[in-house]
Amino acid sequence: MNFTDKIIWITGASSGIGESLAIDLSNRGAKLILSSRNEAALNKVKSNCKNPQNIEVLPLDLEDYSNFDLDVSKALSFFDGIDILLNNGGISQRSLAKDTSIHVDKRIMDINYLGTIALTKALLPHFIQKNKGHFVIITSIVGKIGSPLRSSYAASKHALHGFFDSLRAEVYQHNIKVTIACPGFVKTNISLNALTADGSPYNKMDKATYNGLSSDVFSKKLLHAVKRQKQEVYIGGIKEKLGVYTQRYFPKLLSVMIRKLAVT
């Protein structure tokens, strides 16, 4: 796959991984639609890209997913179609399950899971009609391995795996591809914006997040996987990727290792 002139819609594009993907894809000649809640930040990302004339900004709140059909219609009108939907938007968590309000659990599921699949479903008829398309979903290693302080975040990411694995089988006949990308620790603002037990932001940078991959490195690795149309890819440090395979072959050992993680 060559990204030149591909029309790519990126959610969560105002910072972090989404911003790096926008800059990288613009450098490769793609036409972009950038979405998040923060229109000012999106415009800043656009101005930092190589070809801003080939970029449109479409403010979008994944939590408000009741009428994405209108947003999809607008997105399709920009460049007369879409080739790839890059589902990157979401929110994390830093709280023990016993302390977390059910309203926080619901908000995380609304944004990470329901908002993502609602947008996917709204765009799906377009992909079916033209008999091709590519959904790229950024979940998390935590979508494969639950860990302390992230119970609802892990649940939302696990749910995405279930949905998109099923969707992949359903749309294969329409030449629609599905790539699930599972980041380990990536140095972004994800922990700063994470929800705590009462729904307030965590406002701290995790040490592991701070020492994670740069979002630019992650972007290059992800786009390499998308070009190869990989079904699932793990992008992170050795420990995160090793955890996935330890769970697969030695699940009891991984359970012991997870219990020893620091819980505050």
Image (cartoon, rainbow, N blue to C red):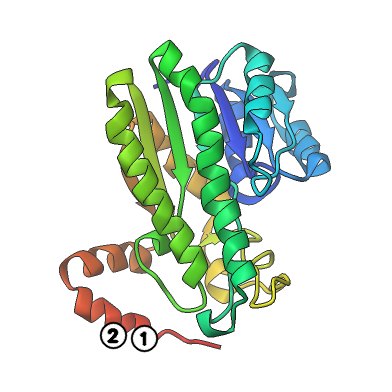
Secondary structure category for the residue under label 1: helix
Q: In this view, does 184 lie above or below 129?
A: below
* Circle 1: residue type: Arg
Front residue of 244/239: it is: 244
Tell me where residue 261 appears, x and y as whole percent: 42, 84
Q: In this view, does 156 lie above or below 83?
A: below
Tell me where residue 12 appears, x and y as whole percent: 64, 45
* Circle 2: residue type: Val
Q: Mark 1 points at which residue?
A: 259
Q: Name the residue under label 2.
A: 256
Tell me where residue 226 appears, x and y as whole percent: 40, 34
User: What residue lies at 68% left-to-right and 64% top-to-bottom?
Assistant: 193
Q: How far apart are marks 1 and 2 (CA)?
A: 5 Å
Question: In the drawing, does residue 213 fall left or right of residue 67?
Answer: left
Graded by Cα atoms within 10 Å as few (under 14), some (14 to 19) or many (20 or more), the crowding at tag 1 reads few
Tell me where residue 151 appears, x and y as whole percent: 48, 72
Secondary structure category for the residue under label 2: helix
Q: In this view, does 187 lie above or below 259?
A: above
The number of discs equals 2
CB-based contact (under 8 Å), mark 1 and mark 2 = yes
Residue 110 visible within the image: yes
